[in-house]
Image (tube, grey):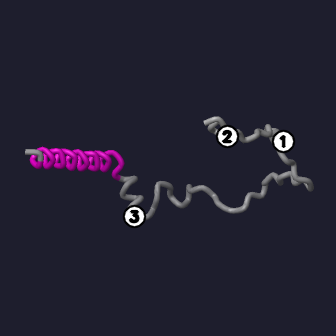
Amino acid sequence: MVQVAAALLFAIAAGLGITVILAMLKNNESAILSALLGEGAFPIATGPVTGPANDAVPLRRRAERRDAPRPVRAVLTARPVLSRAA
């Protein structure tokens, strides 16, 4: 009985997965096919331009390193967990 229920749940999940895949293909068929063919979402002519930027802002470099202030840690003495009388 448990095996039959598991088989039915598996069949329902597989059917739902196939339904989702078919719905995605129906809505975005051209985008998915172009991606599978290697064209990508953007045509080459309208793609982003890569290369070095001519108008890059140079970073300010300082000779000395600026260390961030660190909090002062309190010195604690270690106390035994058990008392000496125990």
Give the labeled residue for mark 3: 37
- Report which residue position mark 1 lands on: 69
Direction from residue 1 to residue 10 in the image, left or right: right
Q: Residues within 10 Å of mark 1 (few under 14, many from 20)?
A: few
Q: Residue furthest front?
A: 85
Q: CA distance from mark 3 to mark 1?
A: 56 Å
Nearest the viewer among 63 and 49 is: 63
| Placement of 76 over or under 6, stated as above or below | above
Q: Tell me how far mark 2 sits from mark 3, CA to CA.
A: 71 Å
Dots 2, 3 in contact, CB < 8 A:
no
The stretch of residues the image draws in magenta is: 3-29
Badge number at residue 80: 2
Q: Nearer the viewer, mark 2 or mark 3?
A: 2
Dot 3 crowding, Cα within 10 Å, few <14, some 14–19, many 20+: few
The answer to whether residue 15 is left or right of residue 56 is left
Decide whether residue 11 is among the magenta residues. Answer: yes
Residue 10 is tagged as none
- Residue 31, percent from left and from top: 40, 53
Element on which disc 1 rests: loop
User: Looking at the image, is mark 2 or mark 1 earlier in the sequence?
Assistant: 1
Tell me the quarter of the image containing the C terminus: top right
Q: Nearer the viewer, mark 3 or mark 1?
A: 1
- Image point (38%, 61%), residue name: 36
Does the stretch in magenta take in 70? no
